[in-house]
Image: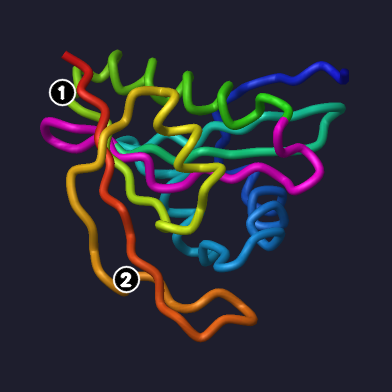
Amino acid sequence: MTERRLRRLDETDAATLEALETTQPPALRSRQLLAALSDPAMLVLGVESGGVLVGHAVVARLPFDAELQALLVAPDWRRQGVAVLMLDAVIDQAHAWGSERLLLEVREGNAPARALYARAGFVEDGRRCAYYPPLEGTSQREDALLLSLPLG
């Protein structure tokens, strides 16, 4: 297995971050990515292998909580521990910030992500009905599940 390196991303990584985002719709917009990279209340982590960005996570510091806003792994790198590596780093960062909880939302139909979060100890707090637009090739909107991980 190729060595993976986890690091904080910054504005110089914007183009590679955007390229990774296009591997999975709906992609974050350029201005959202640039804002996250330059916001001191946010952390954008990336995992590289052989100098190529293969995953990223975006976490925001809130007054009492932290919020995982995005976690994406390149299709060829899924099921190889990249998401676990990033999620562990995000949880560590939320602890370092003194956050009481780590919050996130996930598509109800995203079984791999839901399994990852369940293994990490996240619990469902609620849902937003028909929140996500239909995925390509479908016509049904999808619920967002609201999850949290107590950090206290």
Q: Residue at x 34, y 23 (%)?
A: 121
CA–CA distance between discs 2 and 1? 26 Å
31 in relation to 77, above or below: below
- In the image, 112 versus 55, the foreground residue is 112
On the image, numbered disc 1 is attached to which residue?
Answer: 100
For label 1, the crowd category at 10 Å Cα-Cα, with few meaning under 14, some 14 to 19 and many 20 or more, is: some
Residue 76 in magenta stretch: yes
Q: Which residues are magenta?
A: 61-79
Q: Is residue 25 left or right of residue 29?
A: right
Q: Is residue 119 left or right of residue 101?
A: right
Residue drawn at 38 percent across, 37 percent down = 59
Instruction: From the top left corner, tell me how far across and down residue 150 is, in percent.
Output: 20, 23
Question: Is disc 1 placed on a helix, strand or loop?
Answer: loop
Check the picture and name the quadrant holding the C terminus.
top left
Which of discs 2 and 1 lies nearer the camera? The answer is 2
Indicate the amino acid at tag 2.
Answer: Tyr
Label 2 sits on residue: 131
